Each structure stands twice: as C-alpha cells, then as structure tokens.
Amino acid sequence: MQALRTFVNGTPSRVVGIEDRGLQYGDGLFETIAVAEGLPLLLQAHLIRLRAGAARLGLGPLPSDQELAREIDELCRGMPRGVAKLVVTRGEAGRGYRYDADAIPTRILSLWPWPAYVDAHRRNGIALRVCRLRLAHQPVLAGIKHLNRLEQVLARAEWRDEYQEGLMCDARGLVIEGTMSNVFAVVDGVLFTPDLGEAGVAGLLRESVLGCARDLGIDCRITPMTLDMLGSACELFMTNSIIGIWPVQSLEGRPYPVGPLTRRIQTELEKRRHVAISSQG
Amino acid sequence: MQALRTFVNGTPSRVVGIEDRGLQYGDGLFETIAVAEGLPLLLQAHLIRLRAGAARLGLGPLPSDQELAREIDELCRGMPRGVAKLVVTRGEAGRGYRYDADAIPTRILSLWPWPAYVDAHRRNGIALRVCRLRLAHQPVLAGIKHLNRLEQVLARAEWRDEYQEGLMCDARGLVIEGTMSNVFAVVDGVLFTPDLGEAGVAGLLRESVLGCARDLGIDCRITPMTLDMLGSACELFMTNSIIGIWPVQSLEGRPYPVGPLTRRIQTELEKRRHVAISSQG
C-alpha cells in the first residue's frame, strides 16, 4: 500500500534528505487524521496537540495554523474517506545529537486509503491480547506523539491476525494503552481510562470520548489501572482518530458484551462528527 | 556541516522515501565508524553489532558482510581521517506499526569530516556534567544502537558549550552512560563500567577498552554504578568509536587528574589501531 498523495514542505515530493533528524534519531512528531468528504476531522485539535509536542521537544518554528490547514485541506481535497498523516521533524542537520534551535522543521504530509477493516470492527468489536513487551517510563516523552516508536513496532510483531489489537502494560504491570489506541473500561457504571503521565500517547479520540461521556452525564476517571480491573469491567473499548471506538469482544479469550454505554458514546461521537463514518452509515 | 559522500542502497543518493520506516518510527539501527587512511576501523566488530541489533529488531535480510564492507570501503576511499555512518532501517512500508518480515532494509551510508575538537580533548580531558533527563528502562532495546534517540537529543539540549559531554542516569539514579559515549571509572585500581542490561548502548570502544585492560592485567568489573562511586574514583573517562578515550577533567566541578591507567589504555588502543590517530600523533 502506497500513499496516494504526498507533500514535503508544501511541495509534491516522495523523498526527504538522509540528513533529516527524523530519520537519524526519530527526532519529530506525527498526527494521524481521519478524512471525510474531503475534510480533515478534528483538525484544530490535531494542530494544538502538534504544537504542544513541538514545544516539549523544542522544535524550531512551525508554519501558522492557517498555512498548515491550507496544506492539509489541499492534501485531502476530493477524498470521500481516508487517512491523512502529518510528520514534523526537527529538520536537516549534521551528525550529532546537538541541535540548532533555529533549525527549520521538515513537514511531510501523506494521504492514505481508508482501511477496509475499520467499520466491521466498530460494529462487531475486536479480539484483544496482552502484549509481552512492557512500556518504559519516560515522563519527558509521555503523552506526546513522537517518532520513537520501536516499542509499538516490536509489540505489534508479537501476533499476526489472531487479534485486532494488543494491550500494553508498563514494567509494574499497569495497563497503559493499545499499540495504536487508548483503552477504556466501564466498571460499575463509571468510565475509566489509564493515567498517561509516565508512558503512552494521549490520543485525541481519548479526549473526545471523555468530553462526550461527561456531557452525557457519565462519571469519568483517569487513574492507574490494573489488568484485574479490566477483568471486572462489564464493557471495554479502544479508541483512536481513525478507528473511532472499537468495542472489545474478548480479552485473552475472556468474552465481553458490546454494552450500552459503548454504543451511546459511539453514537454521540458520530453525531459530533469526531469520527469518519461511511457514506452508507 | 554536510556529509561529504552518501550512498543509499549502494547508489550515490542524498534522499530516502518518506514511507521509510526509519523516518516514520525510528525503526532501524546505526553504526558510527572511525576512518583512518581511507579505511574503516573495527569494521568487522561494527558489522557483528549491526547484525545483533538487526536480529533483535527482526529486520529483513541484510547484504553479506563482503558486500557491506565493499560499499563502506568505497565510501571511505582516499579519506585520510573521517567518520563513516551506516544507518539500516526496516525499509519502506505502508502506514501502521505492523511490518512484513520480508521487507528489504534500506541502508544509508554517509561520510563526514573528522571533528576538529576530538584530539585536544583526548590530550587534555573534558568537563562532564550530570544530565537532568533520566534514561528509561527498556531491556528489549537496551544495548543496541537503534534509531529511537530522543532521550539523547533532549539530554544534549540541556547545555551548550560549558561541558563536552553529559552523564545520564536511570530513574533510580544509577549511572548508565554519556549522551554519546560510555563511561569508565578507576576505583582502588579496579576499572568499572556500568551494566547496560536495562538501558544504554554497548559501545564498541567499551568492548575494546575492556579487552585492552584485561590484556594489561587490569581488574575489570561490569556492575551497577552510583554517582557516589564516581565521586570516589581517582580516574574517570568516556569512550566511543570516534573520540576513543576522553579523560574526564571535572565532573560537575569536582576535579579529576588524568591518571596513569587512562593513559596506558589510550596508548594500547592506539597501538592496536582501534582509534583513528592524527598523522602527527
């Protein structure tokens, strides 16, 4: 599968310089944006998170929101449904970890076809496993969507098609997230999601779900979570900007029903157009 | 500073595809090789470490050692003294962490000028600081020279020119390594270097130093090390393939003499041609 359309620094291109620090050190960030009817969804929220990550890493000056939005709109134009990916690196530099604070970041935009499997999993739910690989604690990088993703790559290599997502715990055994998604559990009517202060990516859909749930009067709590807590949950679901909400049908073989709270939040997210729904849906 | 000469997959080129997983996820490895009189030093050891890292990450098939050596020799030809960098990524792929086990790795070779500051620091020693950023524990990635280097990038950003290297500890406060080097301490005639089972890069020069020291009859120990232990050391030095051995002249202001054991090992490494010495030296 290849990208349908790509821009590097605003110009159609499929390549970057080998001296780019994104390639040399994973020195950068990314955003994955759902596209519906030619428009990027939750764009403002993606740009806010991008800038928060850029501030944390000390990246050089980025183009204005207007400029970035113009480029992303151009990328998505005419696409009924797809995935836009924005990578921003610290830019090109010489050898060595030290960087120049004025280095101009490289921005790489690519447009991808909509993944075919998303909708069926939204309806029917998925099989979830627990990954052996444990996430390291690095509070300096926790929460942001940076390009150092070897933990996720190696965790995803633990299985092939038997499951649709893998759950990652930290070294203490606390649940953090999925390899590409955040996790939620409903226990006694309360919606729980793990605290991400020491590891994990704070997904935009995680924010959307918390916002929707609070508006629906659902009690939400961000807290350290154990696997035992998931075992006592009556509903379980995974979220990201592309999949929206995937109900969990089974965790390591233990079955879960796709419950009413999961369906209520799914419906609310669709109503608010936080997720890309199919033209039939 | 730009690379003097570059090859991508054996062909002169300065670019890689934006879909390369090295750029998308830091999904790859690198080696930094000293070049002297047109030849890469310790090449066999670099290739052995590269293959060990490739096995750990599950990279696809690499060219033979002969093929890699031929390309690196061609890169270095005629260079009196310089730095060769080899980056190997998992290759190009679509979006998503999952990889194809048969994906053909991308290999990127670049040749750089010799850094001017190396020799003076070898003679006179350096000022070392302790970085605030703590290294995360990730045993799955510890030891190998992978492309997820944001910790080093952010640690190196803590100072400018006041020091020549920064020492990195883990979350428990144990000493692990420098941002770009390994650390050794001489305490009561014994040569100590930290255990790297949970964090850090096992540098080739670290191996060379341990080998030389043992041959010289010096007692060597690989063990967890505290900052207090460095405080009680009579000699301290940092190592990597390019700098060779840099004696530490001060650690956060506490002075250290450049001691006899450091000088003995420096001389031995030069005699064995494990480091690139200046034509005057």
Image: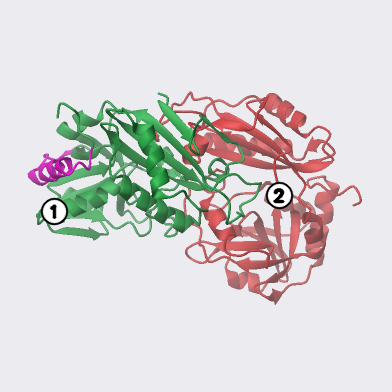
Chain colours: A red, B green
Image height of B220 relative to A29, above or below: below
Give percent across and percent down for residue A3: 70, 40
Q: Is residue B71 left or right of residue A17?
A: left
- Density class for disc 1 (Cα within 10 Å; few <14, some 14-19, many ≥20) is some
Image height of A34 relative to B74, above or below: below
Of B164 and B146, nearer the camera is: B146
Q: What's under tag 2, amino acid-wise?
A: Leu
* Badge number at residue B187: 1
Q: Looking at the figure, which quarter contains the C terminus of chain B?
A: top left
* Number of marks present in the image shown: 2
Of B203 and B83, nearer the camera is: B83
Using the image, name the chain to which the residue with label 1 belongs: B
Give SS at disc 1. Answer: strand
Of B170 and B119, nearer the camera is: B119
Q: Is residue A246 left or right of residue B67?
A: right
Residue at 26% x, 37% y is B243
Q: Is residue A243 left or right of residue B102?
A: right
Q: Quick check: do tags 1 and 2 share a chain?
A: no
Name the residue beneath numbered marker 2.
A205
Residue at 68% x, 61% y is A184
Residue at 71% x, 35% y is A44
* Badge nearest the viewer, 1 or 2: 1
- Density class for disc 2 (Cα within 10 Å; few <14, some 14-19, many ≥20) is many
For residue B223, which quarter of the picture?
bottom left
Which stretch is magenta?
Answer: B254-275
For residue A194, which quarter of the picture?
bottom right
Q: What's under tag 1, amino acid-wise?
A: Val
- Please say whether residue B168 is visible from this viewpoint: no
